[in-house]
Image (cartoon, rainbow, N blue to C red):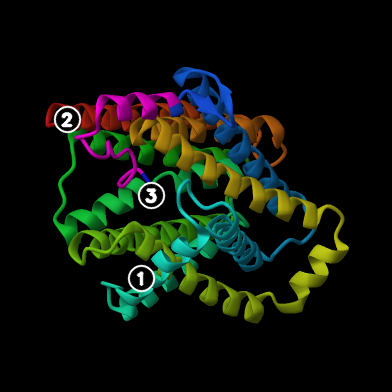
């Protein structure tokens, strides 16, 4: 979304069309709130939904007895996204567009596919593996440390992008990457101080790094599909998510099997937490999409970036049992905040450059 959202649309819009567009951005669910009011409601809703999803995820991973069904969680999340997207196309088509026309557009995307199917199969497989491996890493790390590690995806994306796609980055982005690495080191030392220095603890780091590397590869594969092959965002998402769901379903059935079904059916609150995680995660993603449409990519991504800090702090407040606060954790949180600030600065600079280049 940060790469494709925030389009200004047709620059030849008439004044009346501009005024009509501005008016629609002042209204949410039929209630006139003003532009800032809509932004505040969407931002708050996004933070609330993703916050609930993170709390449910941590409670599920860390507080359900003998939980070890991460592939099933990945399957349910992807199935929720796919199912809700289909329902949206069929029952909530855009204004002045019938669902039959939406179905026709989907058929055209499938028939006029621009990227070789083998590349989508590889991208979907990479996505499925990194999504599950990232969750498995939480088995060996506390949730706050895992969240900080997942936030370092930027570093791996930058590395792969520089080597493979020959992209260039600013000093602000390199500064954010370096600061994020320092934050990860502080959290690792915090876990050591808390007595988590076991072999499994370091396995969590290995799995996190592996998942981030795979995520970076998948991100650059999507970049390659859309920039070099000319695929649309819809085409890339449609094929990758559909094929990814097939891969995750097969692996979840093989790895977790009926044990997962029995666990979620018989363990108190397990199914409730899984449903809360999946539905609020989808609601957060949907709200973020609407926030991007309303305010543009930079303000929306600013809210999403700031949300990471709230998630880390919230994890310490709500679930302090496996991560007692220490000086290392405190320094790590502060450094993480600096990294977020540098990342936001990068986005503001890029937004100003795009605006100046119009």
**Circle 1/circle 2 CB separation < 8 Å:** no
Query: For the point 30% across and 73% down, which residue is it?
Result: 113
Q: Residues within 10 Å of mark 3 (few under 14, many from 20)?
A: many
Q: Which quarter of the image is occupied by the C terminus?
A: top left
Tell me how far mark 1 sits from mark 3, CA to CA: 34 Å
Q: Residues within 10 Å of mark 1 (few under 14, many from 20)?
A: few
Taking the magenta stretch, the answer to whether it contains residue 230 is no
Tell me how far mark 1 sits from mark 2, CA to CA: 35 Å
Image quarter of residue 250: bottom right
Image quarter of residue 201: bottom right
Tell me how far mark 3 sits from mark 2, CA to CA: 24 Å
Secondary structure type for disc 3: helix
Secondary structure type for disc 1: helix
Question: Could you tell me residue 110's position as x and y percent?
Answer: 37, 73
Q: Which residue does the numbered mark 3 point to in the structure image? A: 153
Query: For the point 49% across and 64% down, which residue is it?
Result: 100
Eyeballing the image, is 260 above or below 208? below
Which of the numbered marks, if any, corresponds to residue 108?
A: 1
Report if residue 256 is visible in the image.
Answer: yes
Query: For the point 78% across and 71% down, which residue is it?
Result: 261
Q: Which mark is nearer the camera, 1 or 3?
A: 1
Query: For the point 15% across and 46% down, which residue is it?
Result: 168
Task: Give the mark nearest the N terminus, 3 or 2.
Answer: 3
Secondary structure type for disc 2: helix
Question: Could you tell me residue 294's position as x and y percent?
Answer: 42, 32
How many marks the image carries: the answer is 3
Q: In the image, which residues are magenta? A: 2-23
Q: Residues within 10 Å of mark 2 (few under 14, many from 20)?
A: few
**Circle 1/circle 3 CB separation < 8 Å:** no
Task: Give the mark nearest the N terminus, 1 or 2.
Answer: 1
Task: Give the mark nearest the N terminus, 1 or 3.
Answer: 1
Q: Which residue does the numbered mark 2 point to in the structure image? A: 353
């Amino acid at each position: 979304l940060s790469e494709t959202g925030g389009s200004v649309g047709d620059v030849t819009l008439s004044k009346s069309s501009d005024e009509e567009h501005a008016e629609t951005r002042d209204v949410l669910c039929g209630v006139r709130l003003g532009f800032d009011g809509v932004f505040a409601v969407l931002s708050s809703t996004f933070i609330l939904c993703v916050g609930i999803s993170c709390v449910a995820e941590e409670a599920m991973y860390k507080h359900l007895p003998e939980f070890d069904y991460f592939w099933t969680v990945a399957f349910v999340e992807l199935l929720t996204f796919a199912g809700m997207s289909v329902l949206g196309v069929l029952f909530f088509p855009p204004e002045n567009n019938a669902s039959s026309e939406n179905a026709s557009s989907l058929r055209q995307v499938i028939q006029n596919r621009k990227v070789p199917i083998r590349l989508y199969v590889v991208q979907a497989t990479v996505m499925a593996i990194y999504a599950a491996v990232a969750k498995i890493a939480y088995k060996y790390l506390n949730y706050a440390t895992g969240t900080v590690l997942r936030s370092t995806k930027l570093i791996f994306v930058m590395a792969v992008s520089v080597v493979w796609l020959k992209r260039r980055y600013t000093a602000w982005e390199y500064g954010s990457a370096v600061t994020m690495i320092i934050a990860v080191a502080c959290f690792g030392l915090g876990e050591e101080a808390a007595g988590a220095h076991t072999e499994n603890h370091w396995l969590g780091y290995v799995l996190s790094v592996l998942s981030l590397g795979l995520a970076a590869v998948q991100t650059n594969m999507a970049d390659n599909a859309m920039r070099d092959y000319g695929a649309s965002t819809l085409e890339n998402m449609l094929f990758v998510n559909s094929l990814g769901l097939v891969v995750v379903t097969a692996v979840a059935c093989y790895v977790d099997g009926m044990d997962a079904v029995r666990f979620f059916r018989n363990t108190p609150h397990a199914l409730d937490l899984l449903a809360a995680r999946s539905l609020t995660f989808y609601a957060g993603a949907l709200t973020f999409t609407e926030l991007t449409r309303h305010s543009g990519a930079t303000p929306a991504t600013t809210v999403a970036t700031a949300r990471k800090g709230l998630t880390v702090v919230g994890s310490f407040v709500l679930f302090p049992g496996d991560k007692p606060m220490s000086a290392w954790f405190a320094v790590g949180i502060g450094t993480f905040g600096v990294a977020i600030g540098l990342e936001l600065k990068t986005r503001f600079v890029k937004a100003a450059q795009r605006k100046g280049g119009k």
